[in-house]
Image (cartoon, rainbow, N blue to C red):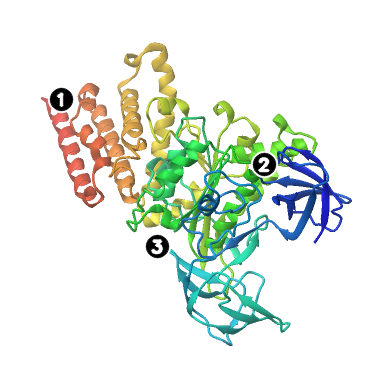
């Protein structure tokens, strides 16, 4: 354990001397107040330390002590439903002990040491186990069955283990490794946040992460284990979109990181998530959620740690075989923390003052996502999907954080302030957004939803693109200058926008659309387009086609409950055929 003293203080950066025996990324305790920090640079016996707490009042000469271990998180029962800060301090427990203000230097275990957990053993003494094998399980909530795993890197023979009620600090058994050393087994273990947890194999993205949001699932799908970015200006709906994804995405565990966002916005999350009902179980959404809260008024250095803390916890649940969705809101604030620390370290700045290693740090974060075969003797798959919100100043995605993110992620859901002002939500711009997973997921949609899924998707995107081109003409010479066929395209594009892409997050039926319902909606809109185009070719009047009563039913189809969608779709198709036939009969007369 290395001890030194403070030489210089510059905001969250502390330079300490006499630290020759310390290592990079060691956790240190700074001053007599024992503020927590991390070594981020070493020069001889001088260590540059980023301090995760307020440094006002520190003086040169005060002691600095290295703990000899890297910044790590505690992984075990008690994570679910927990609210932690960027370095995994339990905010609820701190409030109980110190009040509403976060005291400096406070040392509280991340996981509650007083809770008794009922452990059920899954292995027996004498059994051979390896890293990632399941030792047993704890029923953490009614939704989450917490699997107690052999820590990665540890293997050997179980010497003793027993079911029963345990505190976290009570050993549940012992394991003898190949060298004959005895290791005590606990319900939890620690893992360094900057090191990705190992796995056997990463798989190609061939399954979608179904979200129930039509613009995402149908037009710009995310793969299970994939990575996506949601850039958008203030007020464009990033937070509500992430709430929707957290509530409806087919994920077993949600990890939500509030990284540098406004305090009142994080307060909304903390207030709303416990009230949101998990649609699959009827329980509070918090029963399968971990929240990392590191708001903009908290020390800036802890923003960087919060991203790594969140993804390490997400990897831990992935290793149990769960499907995990991680929401990071927002990586722009994290990048700003990197920029501030880089400036104080006097590093050569890159574009707009961000450090030259910004892109590589972003890549290190996003590349920890994926669908993998987890460690252990059993063949189990887990997945971790990472969705990062980006908050570019003024909504300008040409800035470095957005551009570096776009080079890494394969799904771009571009939020548009103009759509938000028009009350079109989700305000995802269909002309600028894209998904590079669409081709690899196409066979899954064809086999599991409908053979015409990808055809419908392609036609929707083509019609929306043509509408954008026709709008230029309409602005110049007016709608009357368009041909009947082009007017029909404009009407169908409006139907796609208003009846399909527009989705009410607060409507009890429209808030979620199954893939089957989305496919029926696409078929109805395209069915109208095809029959109307045929009628136009036979001399029908465009005004009469546009005014067909069946269009109202097509528009209202999204409010049809899931149980009634097939019957309603058949009824609408029948009415459409009848009304088009009536128009043609009158034309002949």
Other-residue count near label 2 (Cα within 10 Å), few / some / many at <14 / 14–19 / ≥20? some
Q: Circle 1 — which element?
A: helix
Of 283 and 215, nearer the camera is 283
Q: Residue 587 bears which disc, if any?
A: 1
Query: Upstream in the sequence, badge 2 or badge 1?
Result: 2
Cα distance in 3D space between marks 3 and 1: 61 Å
Of 176 and 106, nearer the camera is 106
Cα distance in 3D space between marks 2 and 1: 79 Å
Compared to 160, does 219 lie above or below?
above
Q: Nearer the viewer, mark 2 or mark 3?
A: 2
Compared to 400, does 321 lie above or below?
below
Q: The C terminus is located in which quarter?
A: top left
Q: Give the x, y percent position of residue 286.
A: 42, 53
Determine the image quadrant of residue 102.
top right
Q: Nearer the viewer, mark 2 or mark 1?
A: 2
Q: Give the x, y percent position of residue 551.
A: 23, 32
Q: Which residue is found at the position 61% from the left and 54% from the top?
A: 368
Q: Residue 529 bears which disc, if any?
A: none
Q: Which residue is found at the position 57% from the left and 52% from the top?
A: 310
Q: Give the x, y percent position of residue 471.
A: 41, 21
Compared to 554, does 162 lie above or below?
below
Q: Residue 54 bears which disc, if any?
A: 2
Q: Is residue 294 left or right of residue 554?
A: right
Q: Residue 143 bears which disc, if any?
A: 3
Q: Which residue is found at the position 61% from the left and 47% from the top?
A: 103
Cα distance in 3D space between marks 2 and 3: 38 Å
Q: Circle 3 — which element?
A: loop
Q: The N terminus is located in which quarter?
A: bottom right
Q: Is residue 406 visible?
A: no
Q: Residue furthest bottom?
A: 126
Q: Nearer the viewer, mark 3 or mark 1?
A: 3
């Amino acid at each position: 354990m290395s001890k030194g003293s403070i030489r210089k203080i510059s905001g969250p950066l502390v330079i300490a001397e006499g630290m020759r025996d310390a290592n990079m990324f060691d956790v240190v305790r700074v001053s007599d107040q024992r503020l927590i920090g991390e070594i981020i640079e070493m020069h001889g016996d001088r260590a540059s330390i980023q301090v995760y707490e307020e440094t006002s009042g520190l003086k040169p000469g005060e002691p600095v002590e290295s703990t000899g271990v890297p910044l790590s998180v505690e992984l075990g029962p008690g994570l679910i439903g927990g609210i932690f800060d960027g370095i995994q301090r339990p905010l609820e427990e701190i409030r109980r002990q110190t009040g509403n203000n976060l005291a400096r230097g406070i040392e509280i275990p991340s996981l509650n040491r007083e809770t008794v957990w009922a452990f059920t053993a899954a292995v027996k003494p004498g059994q051979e186990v390896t890293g990632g094998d399941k030792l047993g399980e704890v029923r953490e909530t009614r939704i989450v069955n917490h699997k107690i795993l052999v820590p990665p890197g540890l293997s050997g023979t179980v010497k003793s283990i027993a079911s029963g009620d345990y505190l976290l600090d009570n050993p549940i058994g012992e394991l003898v490794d190949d060298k004959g050393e005895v290791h005590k087994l606990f319900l939890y273990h620690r893992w360094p946040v900057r090191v990705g947890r190992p796995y056997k194999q990463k798989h190609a993205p061939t399954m979608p992460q179904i979200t129930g949001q039509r613009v995402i699932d149908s037009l710009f799908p995310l793969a299970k284990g994939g990575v996506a970015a949601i850039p958008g200006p203030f007020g464009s709906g990033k937070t509500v979109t992430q709430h929707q994804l957290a509530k409806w995405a087919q994920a077993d565990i949600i990890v939500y990181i509030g990284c540098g966002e406004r305090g009142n916005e994080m307060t909304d999350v903390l207030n709303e998530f416990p009230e949101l009902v998990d649609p699959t179980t009827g329980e509070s959404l918090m029963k399968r959620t971990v929240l990392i809260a590191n708001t903009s008024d908290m020390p800036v250095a802890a923003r960087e740690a919060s991203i790594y803390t969140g993804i390490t916890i997400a990897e831990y649940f992935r290793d149990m075989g769960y499907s995990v969705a991680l929401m990071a809101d927002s990586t722009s604030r994290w990048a700003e923390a990197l920029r501030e620390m880089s400036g104080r370290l006097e590093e050569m700045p890159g574009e707009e003052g961000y450090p030259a290693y910004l892109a590589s740090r972003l890549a290190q974060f996003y590349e920890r996502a994926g669908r993998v075969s987890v460690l252990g003797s059993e063949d189990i798959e887990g997945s971790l999907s990472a969705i990062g919100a980006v908050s570019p100043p003024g909504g300008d995605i040409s800035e470095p954080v957005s551009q570096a993110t776009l080079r890494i992620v394969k799904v771009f859901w571009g939020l548009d302030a103009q759509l938000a002002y028009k009350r079109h939500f989700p305000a995802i711009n269909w002309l600028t957004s894209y998904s590079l997973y669409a081709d690899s997921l196409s066979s899954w949609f064809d086999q599991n939803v409908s053979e015409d899924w990808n055809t419908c998707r392609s036609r929707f995107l083509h019609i929306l693109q043509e509408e954008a081109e026709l709008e230029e003409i309409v602005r110049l010479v007016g709608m009357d200058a368009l041909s009947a066929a082009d007017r029909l395209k404009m009407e169908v594009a409006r139907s796609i926008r208003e009846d399909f892409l527009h989705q009410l997050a607060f409507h009890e039926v429209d808030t979620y659309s199954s893939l089957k319902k989305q496919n029926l909606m696409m078929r109805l809109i395209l069915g109208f387009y095809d029959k109307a185009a045929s009628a136009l070719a036979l001399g029908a009047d465009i005004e009469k086609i546009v005014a067909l009563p069946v269009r109202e039913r097509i528009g209202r189809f999204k409010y049809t409950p899931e149980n009634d969608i097939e019957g309603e779709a058949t009824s609408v198709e029948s009415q459409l055929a009848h009304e088009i036939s009536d128009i043609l009969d009158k034309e002949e007369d």
